[in-house]
Image (tube, helix red, strand yellow):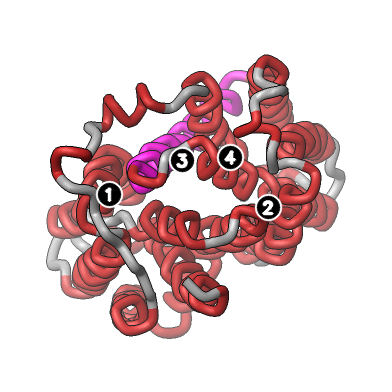
Amino acid sequence: MKEISWKDNLRIAWLGSFLTGACISLVVPFMPIFVEQLGVEPSQVTFYSGLAISVSAISAACVSPLWGILADRYGRKPMMIRAGLAMTITMGGLAFVPNVYWLLALRLLNGVFTGFVPNATALIASQVPKDQSGYALGTLSTGVVAGTLMGPLIGGLIAENLGMRNVFLLVGFFLFLVSLLTFWGIEEEYEPLPKEEQKSSWQLLMSIQQKDILLGLFLTSMTIQMIAQSISPILPLYVRALGQRDNLIFVSGMIVSAMGVSSMLFSGWMGKLGDRIGNHRLLLIALLYSGCLYILCAQAQSPLQLGILRFLFGIGTGALLPGVSALLNRLTPPEGISRIFSYNQLFYYLGGVLGPMMGSSIFMHFGYHWVFYGTALLAFTDLMFLLFLFRKYLKVRDVRAN
């Protein structure tokens, strides 16, 4: 396939990944108000709004491997189109829900029928030249990260100016456009293996020589998302404790989104750096960098300092995600790449659920600053774990040849 083809595919895949990430998170700023407007008792608003926010990520984590199996059988492009059209209905349909039960049902289905991101990643990984895989996968990875982190700010601004229900209609419309772009613009030359040559998921996992590194990368994907999301439950409170009184929600949203902006700006460059120095080295450096920045965040004296540090943290995220994706691409046989990236996405979604839970628990017992210290400790723990694995296989060509 010509070089221009995978680059065109990358642009469309990035846009779809961005909107997929935004679909999960853009409802966060106004979900409690929306739930309240649906007639829920005030004492139950917090419960139902939290459930509506999390159920999409949980269901996506549970079902993601199934779509990976189907993608390895029938191709990645059909699964991307399926996901785009399904999310068009589930997100656009939220504009018409009459009660909270329909809201929960559509949010659940939104997660069930997702799968755009892992299949887009598998598609690009299967097409890009190996010496540019870090750059391509790094660029693509910024889509879902930026969508997830900038979604709350975008959703809040649209809801304030156009109304909450119109947010869902607008997102549904853009998802439909992405589905059309995928259908007409994505090129894939996919020939499934004969049925007798196809491997089960268990056979696929057993065929990978560096299974412990594979597991380490899955856990790192979960850690990346836990690190990114751990402070989300306490961020507005922490910003207020730093002296911010006016426009608290807006300032908090800007601080959250700062990470997504820097990740978008630097991830492609970080991917190129990984191609040059080795993605395993870049991964270790990025974990060390991220842990150190979280320690600095605990010492922030103003919202401005916190925002700057959060922006700098996004550079580390821009190095972590392409490093994981590029190494997974090298470890995985071509016939199983969709399934492996789907399993990786499962861990990524789990991190999005566990991260806020971890942050809330630490805050309740130890206070604001220890949320940052605990998150830094998580990054350093993953660093030591990966360092042990990479040292063990330092001479293995699949890991070293980046």
> Residue 271 versus residue 247: which sits nearer the camera?
271
User: Which residue is tagged 3?
Assistant: 348
* Image point (69%, 58%), residue name: 267
Eye-nearest disc, 3 or 4: 4
Q: Nearer the viewer, residue 287 or 311?
A: 287
Q: Are marks 2 and 1 in contact (CB under 8 Å)?
A: no
Callout 2 amino acid: Gly
Report helix, strand or loop for mark 2: helix
Q: Secondary structure at mark 4?
A: helix
Image mark for residue 318: 2
- Between 169 and 122, the residue placed more toward the observer is 122
Where residue 6 appears, as percent x and y from the top left, is 51, 71
Q: Main secondary structure of the magenta part?
A: helix
State which quadrant residue 17 falls in.
Answer: bottom left
In the drawing, does residue 290 fall left or right of residue 375?
right
Circle 4 packing at 10 Å, graded few (<14), some (14-19), many (20+), is many
Of labels 3 and 4, earlier in sequence is 4
Q: Amino acid at mark 1?
A: Asp
385 left or right of 183?
Answer: right
- The segment highlighted magenta reads 336-365
Residue 329 image point, x, y percent: 51, 44
